[in-house]
Image (spheres, rainbow, N blue to C red):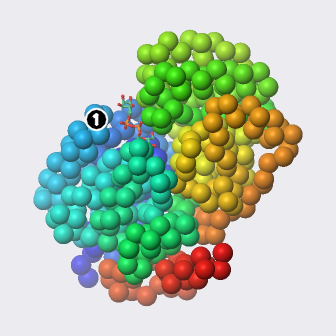
Amino acid sequence: MQRLRIDLIAAARPNFMKVAPLFHALHEQSWCRLRLVHTGQHYDENMSEAFFRDLKLPPPDLHLGVGSGSHAKQTANVMLAYEEACAADRPDLVVVVGDVNSTVACALVSTKLHIPVAHLEAGLRSGDRRMPEEINRLVTDTLADILWTPSPDADEHLAAEGVPPEKITRVGNIMIDSYELMRERIDAAGERRRLGLENRAYAVVTLHRPSNVDAAAPLTALVNQLIRMAVRLPLVFPVHPRTRKNLEAFGLWSKLANAPNLQVIEPLGYVDFMSLVCGAHLTITDSGGIQEETTYLGIPCLTLRTTTERPITITEGTNRLVTAAELLPALDEILAGRWPRGRKPQLWDGHTAARVAADIRRRLLGVPPRVAEATAVPVAANRRTLGNA
Ligand code: UD1
């Protein structure tokens, strides 16, 4: 039997934990041959290699080395390099994940070469077209031949945009697979102890969205609020390179770094970061993934954004959208124990990669899923779920 040649595209920090479970589910299968492609969008040791090590990913088969640049430049450089890679060794299926510039770039290249594209984490929408990721999501989902969704709201968006139902399979949340795969190592990690933090007596902060960190006014307001919050609860803040650059440019770095009860540290690898999150009383973030991880873990999450493409973390989970001014009152609520505990959304169970693998075999090789794999929700059932809601 001819093996199905699958390209798995990894690019930036939030991609690696989405790609890893799929890599582990597919790489020893006799029916496919994987090529792990790293576009090089993230390249710092602690934004890239640390994640490959933690998530037990081998070095990529192909590294496109595109690096940073404006949106157009970064997207175009990925397209140029990936088109060459496809010409040299044409895959039968390209799997892209998430919503970064490399996701849309590789989807564009594959579609124009008539290579089927599958998008993992399809259908998420913030409704805010000023977010670069929203544009990437819209374009990628328009192009994709197979759309794997994490939640019913995603199915609903795709249906409203006219995506034919037979292209969509709800498979659940792949991020949870990574957490479950690494859970023992996360539980054993000593990051909390190293930082002198007591269990449940601190908050984790992450910030990197352009809307929060690219201009002086919002970033200054956030820094002031964080310093005030740290008086009530110690904060630990692994700082993204983009944020660090801007804190330094706006003269805010030393103010933040010298604030009492507030530790600014380098970005952490996956295991150390998740061990910090697991022990935290709450998280303060503008990340997409952390909204989901905290919902799964039942940890309160304050999201510094006006919209989220992951509304299920609010309706079913522990997440709330807040402004800088709302941080302190929200902290009071959480410390007083007045915060919803939430529940784990359906199919956020650590078995998403297995459902994706089964869906690939069904769609491209005509192999019916085994009973254990057949829990992916086809779109007709999605519609019933939505209708009942
Ligand atoms: C990108 C993604 C965003 C994701 C985030 C996670 C897009 C549009 N954005 O945003 O969706 O949530 O990754 O981190 O794809 N830099 C380094 N070292 C690195 C990477 C970046 O120093 O390894 C610096 C560069 O100066 C770069 C800046 O950080 O210009 C921003 O990096 P970039 O990849 O453009 O966007 P992110 O903000 O990381």
Number of numbered markers: 1
In terms of secondary structure, where does tag 1 sit? loop
Q: Decide if residue 55 is on the left or right side of residue 30.
A: right
Q: Decide if residue 88 is on the left or right side of residue 388.
A: left
- Binning the other alpha carbons within 10 Å of mark 1 as few (below 14), some (14 to 19) or many (20 upward) gives few
Q: Which quadrant of the figure contains the N terminus?
A: bottom left
Residue 8: percent from left, percent from top: 34, 59
Residue 334: percent from left, percent from top: 80, 41
Q: Decide if residue 115 is on the left or right side of residue 251.
A: left
Q: In this view, which residue lies farthest toward the right?
A: 336
Residue 89: percent from left, percent from top: 17, 61
> 357 and 160: which one is in front?
160
Residue occupying the point 27% across, 75% down = 3
Residue occupying the point 55% across, 62% down = 173
Q: Decide if residue 357 is on the left or right side of residue 64.
A: right
Name the quadrant where ligand 1 sits: top left
Is residue 52 positioned above or below 67 on the image? below
Residue 50 visible from this viewpoint: yes
Q: Which quadrant of the figure contains the C terminus?
A: bottom right
Residue occupying the point 21% across, 43% down = 77
Is residue 250 positioned above or below 202 on the image? above
Residue 243: percent from left, percent from top: 48, 27
Q: Quadrant of residue 200?
A: top right
Asked whether mark 1 and ligand 1 are closer than 8 Å, the reply comes as no
> 97 and 90: which one is in front?
97
Disc 1 residue type?
Ser
Residue occupying the point 81% across, 40% down = 333
Q: Quadrant of residue 242?
A: top left
> 94 and 339: which one is in front?
339
**Residue named by callout 1:** 70
Is residue 206 positioned above or below 219 on the image? below
Residue 289 visible from this viewpoint: no
